[in-house]
Amino acid sequence: MDGQVALLVEDDVLVGMGIKSSLEQLGATVTWRNNVAGALDAVNSPTAYDFAIVDINLDGEVSAPVLDRLIEEAIYTVVSSGYDASNLDQRFQHLPRCEKPFTRASMRRLLCERGCV
């Protein structure tokens, strides 16, 4: 994952710190945002992201606008959620998904499928 640039969108501080640390240990540079507005600013910035990990529920706000922008930009996106797949909007069903709580190994497996690791 050396040299990869990741966008992490997660509202839970402990979960976010854990994911960020794991990604950095694998060699990624991580931008972490904890709300929809901040995540949209990050996606719309000049930074070229190789992949994103996005929590579907950000403190009660659905991250659909962020997912829509990431799809528009063709950025490989993994949805992280504590909810099962049936709660995910139909237009995001095709995205790879990591159900919380997830392990570093399961996150790495999803990223390996894309070649990020």
Image (cartoon, rainbow, N blue to C red):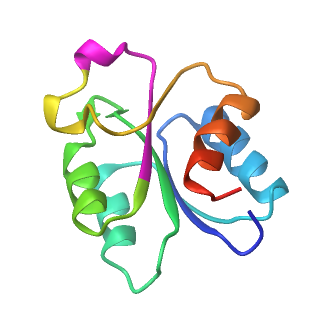
Res. 33 visible in picture:
no
Q: Is residue 58 left or right of residue 51?
A: left
Q: Is residue 38 left or right of residue 67?
A: right
Give the quadrant of the N terminus: bottom right
Residue placed at 34% from the left, 34% from the top?
56
The question of residue 66 being in magenta is answered with no
Q: Position of residue 109 (x, y in %)?
A: 66, 37
94 or 32: nearer the eye? 94
Res. 14 visible in picture:
yes
* Residue 62 position by quadrant: top left
Q: Position of residue 43 (x, y in %)?
A: 35, 69
Give the quadrant of the C terminus: bottom right
Q: Is residue 113 left or right of residue 62?
A: right
The residue positioned farthest toward the left in the image shown: 90
Q: Is residue 95 left or right of residue 103?
A: left
116 or 15: nearer the eye? 116
The residue positioned farthest toward the bottom in the image shown: 46
**Which region is colored magenta?**
77-87
Residue placed at 32% from the left, 18% from the top?
85
Q: Position of residue 96 (x, y in %)?
A: 43, 37
* Residue 26 position by quadrant: bottom right
Q: Is residue 8 above or below residue 10?
A: below
The question of residue 78 being in magenta is answered with yes
Residue placed at 80% from the left, 64% from the top?
27
Q: Is residue 22 above or below residue 87?
A: below
Residue placed at 77% from the left, 69% from the top?
2
Q: Is residue 116 above or below residue 98?
A: below
Q: Position of residue 53 (x, y in %)?
A: 49, 47
The residue positioned farthest toward the right in the image shown: 25
